[in-house]
Image (cartoon, grey):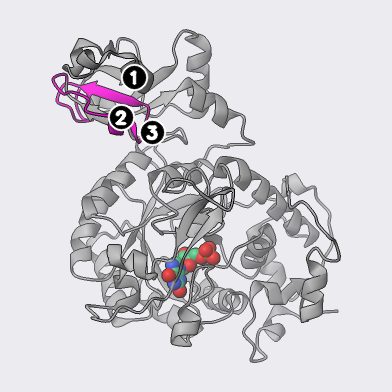
Amino acid sequence: DGFAATKLFNQGYSYTYDDVIFLPHYIDFPTDAVSLSTRLTRRVPLLAPIISSPMDTVTEGCMASAMASLGGLGIIHSNLPTDVQASMVRSVKSRRVPILSTPTFMSASHRIESLDDFESCPYVLVTQSGSPSSKLLGYVSRSDWLQLDDHKKGTRIDTYMTSSDELVVPWNYSLSQMDAYFQEKRERDLAVLVREEQEVVDVVTREEVEKVKEYPRLGAGTVGPDGGWRVGAALGTREVDKERLEHLVKAGVDVVVFDSSQGNSIYQIEMIKYVKRMYPDLDVVGGNVVTMAQAENLINAGADGLRVGMGSGSICTTQEVCAVGRGQATAVYKVASIASQSDVPVIADGGISYSGHIVKALVLGASTVMMGGFLAGSIESPGAYEYQNGSQVKKYRGMGSLEAMTKGSDARYLGDKAKLKIAQGVVGAVADKGSVLKFIPYTMQAVKQGFQDLGASSLQSAHDLLRKGVLRLEVRTGAAQVEGGVHGLVSYEKKAF
Ligand code: XMP
């Protein structure tokens, strides 16, 4: 009944996730027996197969720490100055709570000029030198500052700050340790995370901890050998990227990910070899690729993981503009079938709109999925919410859109210094989705149910069942796709949990 994957994907068609459907298999275990633990690259294990995309409207520090706390991993985008990208890497690695406030730091003689100093965090922290790496002296909260009279507001901060006695907790306190701390110290509403030698990491409030602890099932997360979250960063292939790489390595990056729509190039191959030569302990993800030949080239150059997808992203126009790409289901299956022979894990990048797409990507051979649009619009994505037609939305844009390229990401789409910029992506907006800490655990539970329907209790078992032809698939006709979605209703509420 149905087709084995090898037959279905060798008929000359390029299939997207929606084109194909799995036939159910046999269930002999409960949903919770399904393990989604996996690997991002040869040497980076994960508890959950989810990666946030290196896009400037998706992954900065806040998203990366949330993804790590969920057992996945975030890749910090590179559309920023080198030192800013490296400092984001450092800040994700320097805490164990999925909360990132990025307070402003000042020395005791500084003055707070305006409310702008509270923009990223409702607290200004006062340290001896005014930088995070010196001793904490005190803090000023936004509400305390607003209550000062105008004369006082213009004075040195140490004339009205609250002193920091006993606010300090160790940098690597986990969420449950933070919770226990606030339960014990009933009178306190904030704590400051401090590393050895008095380096101030961040401030955490009682309110944030109360909110996050209500979210479902936050497990151990993706913790590296140094006890902090693991995090990745995007990298280009120009000469200047060698300097970027050095900064990222110094900041402790766990994996670097090339950011190119067509990764099978002499530039990337040379750069992969350079990274492996200079930093043999650092894992490198090559890509993007969609064919077996592309994949083989990057694996031979030393890639420890491959990013798969060309033109499948929700904001992509590469297939329309350049006439090159591949349906994502076919691309994932083909690349994974060759990469598995070299034990190189594959990331299915782009085109994820539902949990069912994640099931398809993983069963077809991917070890993780990389998501942009699915995570944009969450509290943890960069940028502020705006209103459009009465709904709350956040901007989401392609890294090959004119707007993003103007800010700096043209290396991904243009090669060197093309004078005429051609967009391969669009700028749009996505609906407010709340916190990833809330909706990703539900999504993962839905993925586990998909695995259970297929009789696969792990990624490895799904891959084995697919390869042996035990799992069967079919192509869906247009009418079958319509039937597979909600249809025939005048209206309905789209609420999944
Ligand atoms: P989703 O579907 O998750 O896709 O929103 C995210 C992925 O899309 C890729 N990407 C682009 N592709 N033009 C493209 O053709 C672009 O401007 C662009 N920006 C991002 C990228 O692989 C990302 O992870």
Q: Which residue is mark 1?
A: 146
**Callouts 1 and 3 close, C-beta under 8 Å:** no
Q: Residue furthest top?
A: 187
Q: Earlier in the sequence, mark 2 or mark 3?
A: 3
* Local secondary structure at mark 3: loop
**Callouts 1 and 2 close, C-beta under 8 Å:** yes
Is residue 158 toward the left or the right of residue 276 in the image?
A: left
Q: Amino acid at mark 2?
A: Leu
Q: Earlier in the sequence, mark 1 or mark 2?
A: 2
Is residue 198 toward the left or the right of residue 10 in the image?
A: left
Residue count near mark 1 (Cα–Cα under 10 Å), binned few <14, some 14–19, many ≥20: few
Residue 226, percent across and down?
A: 36, 39
Residue 23 appears in the figure: no
Residue 346, percent across and down?
A: 51, 67
- Asked if the beta carbon under badge 3 is closer than 8 A to the nearest atom of ligand 1, the reply is no
Q: Amino acid at mark 1?
A: Leu
Q: Residue 115, labelled with which disc?
A: 2
Question: Which of these two is toward me, 128 or 362?
Answer: 128
Question: Magenta residues, as a range?
Answer: 108-134
**Residues under labels 2 and 3: Cα distance?**
16 Å
Residue count near mark 2 (Cα–Cα under 10 Å), binned few <14, some 14–19, many ≥20: few
Q: Main secondary structure of the magenta part?
A: loop
Question: Which of these two is toward me, 301 or 294?
Answer: 294
Is residue 197 toward the left or the right of residue 27 in the image?
A: left
